[in-house]
Amino acid sequence: MAALSIAILLAAVSLVYSTVGQAGGTAFLAIMAVMGLPADELRPTALILNIVAAGYATWRLSAAQVIDWRLLACVGMPALPLSFLGRMVALDSGLYFVLTGCVLLFAAAMMVTRWKAHASSSPGVVPAAFVGSVSGFASGITGVGGGVFLAPAIVALGWGTARQAANLSAPFILGNSITGLAGVLMAGQRPTADVGPYALAALAGAVVGTMIGQRFMSERATRYVLATILLVAGLRLLSR
């Protein structure tokens, strides 16, 4: 019964997160933590769910030809090895929850720092690589895909609109989650035994959420939803 409740919650948050290009890693972590899963099972389980949800979203966004592949390469390539290294760092559970919660609150603040309708500048290779590296390592330490760090940075720096940042998030999350999963497995952490049903629930949510995001989400709605997601997830982890 507990597993069914978790699966329903995972599907719901996957739907909401997918509307703004996120896989739901932060909420996956919060739900599983609140429901009492051991801390050493949280990161590998959340990463598997990220891969499933972000993989579907990436496929849909690629088919719609809305991914800026140049910018993705600039931020994504340096992020992959740092995400792998970050995943191999196993933190104390208390420190883990506090650090992850604080980082998410900071990302929420970044999201609302600059509210422009259009991108104001095109990033150079070095600045983009730096932002990608920081986002990748942060995703490794916290156990999420990194889209919640990348998207606010892109918006705050004026490199793209919230919608453009959302379109980059899914493939960025997918790459970081794959390398990150390898890192946590090498560190000796293993996913929960119910990861299969949880992955199906995350996929179901991603299918519906991606459709809603592509067809019905305005630029302003994307900003508000993403900022709210970051704020709620950060506060929830801190309360845990």
Image: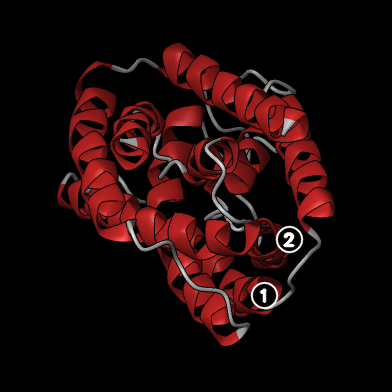
Task: State the residue position of label 1.
Answer: 82
**Residue that numbered label 2 is attached to:** 134
Name the one closer to the observer, 230 or 240. 240
Q: How far apart are marks 2 and 1 (CA)?
A: 8 Å
Against 41, residue 212 (above or below) is: above
| Residue at screen point 52% across, 37% down | 35
Residue 114 screen position, x and y as percent: 70, 23
Rate crowding at label 1 as few (under 14), some (14 to 19) or many (20 or more) other CA atoms within 10 Å. many
Which of 162 and 96 lies nearest the eye of the viewer?
96
Mark 2 or mark 1: whose residue is earlier in sequence = 1
Q: Which of 175 and 238 is in front in this view?
A: 238
Residue 172 visible? The answer is: no
Residue shown at 64%/57% (left/top)?
A: 39
Residue 82 quadrant: bottom right
Tag 2's secondary structure? helix
Residue 171, x across and y down, in percent: 38, 57
Q: What element carries label 1?
A: helix
Residue 181: horizontal and vertical position, in percent? 48, 73
Q: Position of residue 144 (x, y in %)?
A: 56, 53
